[in-house]
């Protein structure tokens, strides 16, 4: 039985990028130590020999590319033959039998990698030029008194609460006196601090002092709007735009500025921000209204597009808005809790509408529907909420709400949901716990009128002898979301999109022989946008969903110290499947165990079924790329995935029987 009337937005967490705060640490299975020289080749066939034309093909980084770090990073490619020697800026580099190579070297200060390859009396040279971060800024700040352009914050449209402290910072020359001058002439001293450059990302979290510049920091309480002198900066959107613009037109108007002085010399730049002020007692109100009706609004506890995702709200959810920053609005959930949402995903309602305040109840209605149970919460307003899954249940917290449910109707033949309990921990929070008699398989939710409908999915019935028989398995070969999306690339230019498709096409017949029904996500060369992949799996009511990938590192990570097998999950109900995938792939190839990892990825954010993203190996290594090219290794990767799927489903069924 299927119900897709609203397309179920909860399956559409489909923009790459961390979610719930305080994620669990990576899990690393205890395994035997592998000698360093064997780590890249354990369990893989030997690399075939090549004796082609001697040439230098630098695959990464590209010519003129900006590298993200300034100390050391990797460079890789091929030289056409395995009997050649290669040096980069004088450093010898190992060459694989097929001519492929990978090196981790200091980033040249001038951005120029000089490569020399030699074989059979022939020598060829090449130069690869890259852009090194911070070089121009450091030179500007060290040569004379300077404020580094683009380093001043806040910048752009900003709004805060009356009395809220606004932090101002910029980078510039060491050993100077810095200050902020407000439009009314008030001077705010700024304190010099050590500038810290932070590099973070997948397997990279590093802070490094920047000795070339200083950072100047201070703050002031927000008492009146700060009008930007630059007319290209838009007016704040939460306050009266006409009053803001009239202030800028006032005779004698001057905007805020930052200054840096040393001796008789002073440099000055305008504060590139338009800052509005909101009365704490009169926040604006907005409604979730994304461009796609079936999508969701993402809430982040910290400001920034790359910050963790903590909340997932369907269209129609109503918010109190009490602040803004470039591209974002701040949602007031309670007096002590806020979140940030993208401005483009919400629609402001007219000023004067009161902040949402909801009542949950009086009835909670449960309706069993085949593979799942509908749990309907009646509400007076579509207030923000948060669903938190656990092994045998879910919790749902409504913000800005009170309630006193009068009755709970569990429905006929309901042997899955044991109890629904509730609590009012504060005047602004109302919480329900949905307790199950077996593990949670998946969930999704939507607004239906003024009611929130939560669908709680029970585990499928399983034949232990043929655990996948009758199950719908969604199969995805990673990448090729567009013609240009090839994913990772190896030193001989094998793309991740090609390698994953080869594995998936070997895995599908195995699944069919096991009696599984295949839900085809990307199983051929057709491009398929990332946003559509979980939608297809959700619409088919897939029981399992996995996406096959091969890995790559960001700039600055030493690949030789960090390569290995990794499997990713997001929601608790997917952790068991990720563990099975990790175990089976490690047993098959014996590469270093880099653990099962929680990470906010587009595929793994689906909630309706256990979902994982697998990373068997790193394509940038010559030995591993060469292995992926072989039918033998493609078959072995597919077989390991198959064993993991069967093992996970069988374990879940046995746990229920116990």
Image (tube, rainbow, N blue to C red):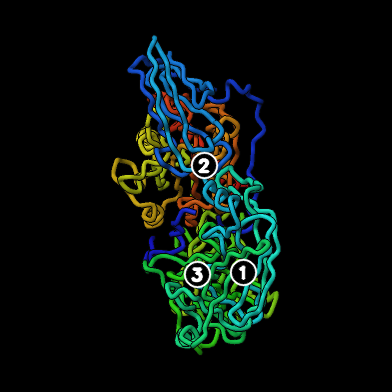
Left or right of 124 in this view: 281: right
> Horizontal and vertical percent for residue 367?
49, 69
Query: What residue sits 48% from the left and 41% below the top?
Result: 467
Viewer-nearest of discs 3 and 2: 3
Q: Quadrant of residue 416?
A: bottom right
Q: Is residue 365 visible?
A: no
Viewer-nearest of discs 3 and 1: 3
> Mark 3 highlights which residue?
156
> Mark 1 highlights which residue?
420
Against 614, residue 423 (above or below) is below
Sequence-wise, which precedes: disc 2 or disc 1?
1
Query: What residue sits 60% from the left and 39% below the top?
Result: 595
> Horizontal and vertical percent for residue 181?
62, 74
Callout count: 3
The residues tagged by marks 2 and 1 sit, at their Cα atoms, a distance apart of 45 Å
The residues tagged by marks 3 and 2 sit, at their Cα atoms, a distance apart of 29 Å
> Mark 2 highlights which residue?
554
Left or right of 628 in this view: 270: right
Callout 2: 10 Å neighbours few (<14), some, many (20+)? some
Say what secondary structure mark 2 lies in: loop
Q: Is residue 397 visible?
A: yes
State the residue in front, 502 or 22: 22
State the residue in front, 505 or 400: 400
Q: Residue furthest bottom?
A: 352
State the residue in front, 16 or 252: 252
Viewer-nearest of discs 2 and 1: 2
The residues tagged by marks 3 and 1 sit, at their Cα atoms, a distance apart of 47 Å
Against 273, residue 560 (above or below) is above
């Amino acid at each position: 039985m299927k119900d897709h009337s609203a397309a179920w937005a909860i399956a559409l967490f489909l923009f790459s990028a961390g979610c719930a705060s305080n994620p669990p640490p990576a899990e690393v299975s205890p395994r035997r130590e592998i000698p360093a020289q064997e780590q890249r080749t354990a369990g893989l066939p030997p690399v075939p020999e090549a004796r082609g034309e001697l040439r230098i093909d630098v695959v990464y980084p590209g010519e003129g590319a900006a590298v993200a770090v300034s100390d050391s990073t990797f460079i890789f490619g091929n030289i056409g033959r395995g009997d050649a020697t290669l040096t980069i800026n004088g450093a010898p580099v190992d060459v694989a039998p097929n001519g492929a190579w990978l090196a981790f070297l200091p980033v040249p200060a001038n951005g120029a990698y000089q490569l020399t390859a030699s074989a059979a009396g022939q020598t060829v040279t090449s130069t690869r030029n890259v852009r090194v971060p911070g070089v121009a800024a450091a030179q500007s700040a060290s040569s004379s008194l300077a404020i580094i352009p683009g380093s001043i914050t806040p910048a752009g449209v900003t709004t805060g609460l009356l009395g809220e402290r606004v932090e101002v910072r910029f980078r510039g020359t060491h050993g100077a006196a810095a200050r902020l001058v407000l439009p009314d002439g008030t001077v705010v001293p700024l304190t010099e601090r050590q500038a810290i450059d932070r590099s973070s990302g997948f397997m990279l979290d590093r802070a490094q002092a920047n000795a070339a510049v200083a950072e100047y920091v201070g703050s002031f309480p927000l008492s009146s709007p700060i009008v930007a002198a630059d007319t290209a900066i838009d007016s704040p959107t939460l306050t009266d735009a006409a009053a803001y613009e009239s202030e800028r037109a006032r005779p004698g108007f001057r905007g805020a500025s930052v200054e840096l002085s040393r001796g008789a010399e002073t440099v000055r730049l305008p504060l590139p921000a338009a800052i509005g002020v909101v009365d704490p007692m009169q926040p604006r109100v907005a409604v979730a209204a994304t461009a796609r009706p079936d999508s969701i609004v993402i809430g982040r506890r910290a400001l920034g597009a790359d910050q963790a995702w903590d909340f997932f709200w369907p269209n129609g959810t109503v918010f109190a808005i009490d602040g803004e920053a470039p591209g974002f609005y701040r949602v007031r959930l309670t007096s002590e809790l806020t979140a940030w949402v993208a401005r483009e995903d919400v629609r402001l309602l007219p000023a004067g509408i009161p902040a949402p305040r909801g009542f949950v109840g009086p009835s909670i209605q449960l309706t069993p529907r085949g593979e799942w149970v509908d749990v309907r919460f009646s509400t007076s307003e579509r207030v923000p909420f948060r669903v938190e899954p656990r092994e045998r249940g879910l919790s749902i917290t409504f913000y800005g709400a009170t309630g006193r449910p009068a009755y709970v109707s569990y429905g006929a033949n309901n042997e899955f949901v044991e109890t629904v309990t509730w609590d009012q921990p504060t005047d602004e929070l109302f919480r329900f716990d949905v307790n199950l008699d077996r593990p949670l398989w998946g969930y999704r939710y939507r607004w239906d009128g003024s009611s929130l409908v939560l669908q709680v999915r029970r585990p499928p019935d399983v034949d232990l002898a043929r655990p996948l028989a009758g199950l719908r398995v969604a199969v995805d070969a990673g990448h090729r979301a567009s013609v240009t999306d090839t994913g990772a690339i190896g030193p001989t230019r094998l793309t991740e999109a090609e390698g994953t498709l080869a594995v998936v096409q070997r895995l599908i017949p195995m699944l069919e022989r096991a009696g599984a029904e295949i839900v085809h996500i990307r199983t051929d060369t057709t491009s398929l946008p990332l946003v559509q992949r979980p939608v297809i799996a959700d619409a088919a009511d897939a029981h399992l969903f996995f996406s096959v990938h091969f890995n790559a590192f960001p700039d600055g990570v030493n690949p030789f110290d960090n390569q290995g097998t990794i499997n990713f999950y997001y929601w608790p109900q997917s952790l068991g499947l990720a563990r099975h995938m990790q175990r089976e792939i490690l047993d098959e190839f014996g590469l270093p165990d880099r653990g099962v990892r929680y990470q906010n990825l587009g595929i793994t954010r689906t909630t309706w079924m256990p979902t994982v993203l697998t990373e068997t190996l790193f394509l940038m290594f010559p030995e591993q790329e060469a292995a992926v090219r072989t039918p033998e290794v493609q078959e072995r990767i597919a077989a390991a995935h198959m064993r993991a799927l069967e093992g996970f489903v069988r374990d879940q069924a046995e746990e229920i029987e116990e």
